Amino acid sequence: MQPGNCRMNGGGGLDGIGGGGGSGSSYGTITLEDLESFSEDQLSDSGIGSLEEEGETMEDEEQQDRLLSYWQDAARGHQVEVPRDMAEPIQQITSNNDGQHDRERVPFTLITRKEKCGDVLYEKRHYEKAHWACITVHEDTYEQSICYGFMKLMRYICQQNSSGTYLGMTIPILTVIRTDENHSVLSSDVTVAYYLPTEYQAQPPQPSDTEISIEEWPATIVYTRAFAGATNEVTIINEIRTMAEVLDSPAVCVNCSFIVAGYTNPAAANRQNEIWFLERP
C-alpha cells in the first residue's frame, strides 16, 4: 500500500489503493459492533473476584472459548469463517479492557445543520487532520471486504502493534466506498479505517501487519446524513442517492468516493450510521 492513498481528502487518491486480503478469504458482514450486543452476564461467570491467579487464567480461557463459539455461530449466518486466533481480540474489545477504555468519538466542529419540519437533513462538519489506521481490501463482495478488513484492524487494536498494548476503540469506524458514475453499483474494493485515540495521535503505534497503513488524513469538510438500519449494497446506494437530493450543492462534493460511518451495534433495533460526502479540496 502506497503512503497517502487512503486519506479522507476528497481527492481522487482513494481509487486504486493497494493492499488487500488475497483471494483465498471467505469473510462476510460481521463487524466489531456485533460484539457489543453481548452483555456481561453472557460473557462472565459470577465469583471471578474470588479466584486465585491460576483460576483466573483458566476462567479467561473459558470466557474466550465461549465468546468465540458464540461469535462463530452468529457468523455462520453471514457465511463468515471466524478463525481461532480471533478469540483474544474479540474478548478484549467486547470486555472494553475491564472498563479502562471509554469509546472515544472522532472530534469535529459543526459548521451548519439543515433541517426540514424538525428533521435534520444533513450536517456540515469540519474534521481536523488526524492519524488513521486503514486497510484496503479486494474481496469478491462488498460484505466480505468489510469483514476481512475489520478483522485485520481488530488485531492491530488488540496488541499487534509496536506498543504491544490494547489501544482502545474509537467511533465511528469508517468504510470508504466507491461507486460507478451512476451511483448504482458498489465496488467490492473498500477501505476500512480506525481513528487513533488522542493519546496515540502524536506517535501512532505501528502495525505488525504490513497490509495496514498509518495515514495522516488532512483537515476535511464533510457533509453527513444519519440513517438507521442495516448497511449493505442496497441501503448504501439508496442513502447516497438521498443525500445527493437533499444537498444544496452536491457538485461541491467528490462524486465517486463516499464514507459509511458506523456507531452502534447492528443487532440493535435502531442502529446508528451516517453517510458522508467529502467536499472537494
Image (cartoon, rainbow, N blue to C red):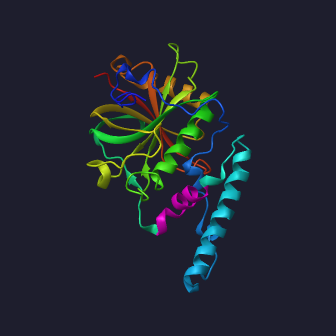
Left/right placement of residue 259 relative to residue 11 reads right
> Which secondary structure is most common in the magenta stretch?
helix
Give 195 or 123, whichever is nearer the viewer.
195
Residue beneath the point at 35% across and 52% down: 197
Position in image of residue 128 (x %, y %): 26, 39
Q: Residue furthest top?
A: 181
Give 156 or 271, whichever is nearer the viewer.
156
- Rendered position, 166 above or below 136: below
Position in image of residue 91 (x %, y %): 57, 61
Instruction: Please provide the residue range marked out in magenta.
Output: 87-98
* In magenta stretch: residue 89: yes
- Rendered position, 135 above or below 138: below
Residue beneath the point at 55% across and 50% down: 33
- Rendered position, 281 above or below 98: above
Position in image of residue 116 (x %, y %): 41, 33
- The quadrant the N terminus occupies is top left
Q: Which image quadrant is residue 62 in?
A: bottom right
- Rendered position, 91 above or below 237: below
Residue beneath the point at 33% across and 19% down: 252
Position in image of residue 132 (x %, y %): 37, 41
Residue beneath the point at 31% across and 35% down: 217
* In magenta stretch: residue 15: no
Q: Which image quadrant is residue 81 in?
A: top right
Decide if residue 118 is in sight here. no
Give 233 or 11, whichever is nearer the viewer.
11
Decide if residue 200 is in sight here. yes
